[in-house]
Image (cartoon, rainbow, N blue to C red):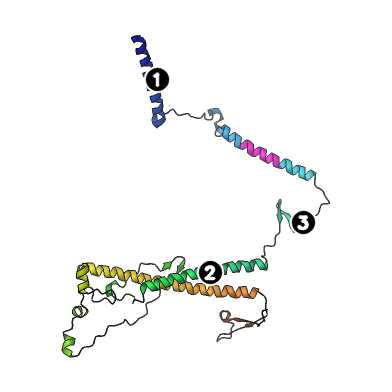
Amino acid sequence: RSLIRNTERRQSSSIETMSASKNLAKVVPGTRRIHRERSQPRARAHLGLLEKKKDYKLRAKDYHRKQDTLKELRFKAAMRNPDEFYFAMHNAQTKDGVHTIERDNALVHRTVKTMKTQDLVYLNHMRAKEQKKIEALQSELQGLGEGDDDDDEDEDDDDDDGDDVGDGTVKREKKKSRKKPQHTIFFDSNKERLNFEATKHFKTTPELVKRRHNRLQQSTIEEQGQFVAQPTARRAARKLAKARRRKYKELEARKERKRKLDKFIEKLQEQKNLMGKGKRRKIVKRNVFGEVDESKTVYVWKRERKR
């Protein structure tokens, strides 16, 4: 009995090792057997690659599809009535063996008017979106001056920033010389004017004295613990000024886009009105050279009583 048990154990262990080796061959790619396809014999190498069954099936399907098409065309030609006539045959012809039909691609008047109405709806929607963004930017900026508290050396820090907003681009223009607002302080005597110190007057730190907005007082800084070193304060001020300039540029770009949308909407509405009914009169305006200025052309419709 012990001998039988030992042989059974050996057989089970050998079976387990065989299954483990098979699983290992599946996992490890180097030990897995590679099944190679039979290549073209050397004597038939001039015929190209050896065709496999999947290639033959594709070629056979394509061949039978073409044969079925030719069979159907032959049947139609055999059953054709020579006296058959349709009015569409006037516009049909054969060019280089290809049957073509001439079609009138002009759109119907009603279809064009519907398309212009859809364009107007979309443009009005985009204009409303731009108006909301402009109002949000204006409320965020609150009419602050552009580049008011930076040093002169920081004026060109933002030259690399683009003026693109979405798909609308505003060309860069030269900055107009604009008089900066000033803070006028009155003194009772010349001695007070000579001994004037801005930090004591505004009760703030030297880093924040040049600000015209968000100028914290010394007491507020000490209470909230917002005192920062001089280089850090200047760096933060430059960052704020740069961000503010970027916001102003975005605001100007959005205003320019809204002006363009207004022009497009006005032009499209005029085209749609001209496609409608009603008597109208065209008023032409000429420039100094006597030429017709189409941009200033106005249409006046006759008044009609609406029931």
Which quadrant would residue 300 be assigned to in this image?
Answer: bottom right
Q: Is residue 60 magenta?
A: yes
Magenta: main secondary structure: helix
Q: Amino acid at mark 2?
A: Leu
Q: Which residue is mark 2?
A: 123
Q: Which residue is mark 3?
A: 89
Q: Is residue 250 magenta?
A: no
The answer to whether 128 is drawn above or below residue 49 in the figure is: below
For image coordinates 77% across by 56% down, the residue present is 89
Q: Amino acid at mark 3?
A: Met
Q: Say left or right for 131 vs 223.
A: right
Q: Say left or right for 113 vs 233.
A: right
Q: Where is residue 168 shown, x and y percent of the image?
A: 46, 68
Q: Which residue is mark 1?
A: 15
Say what secondary structure mark 3 lies in: helix
| Residue 220 in view in this figure | yes
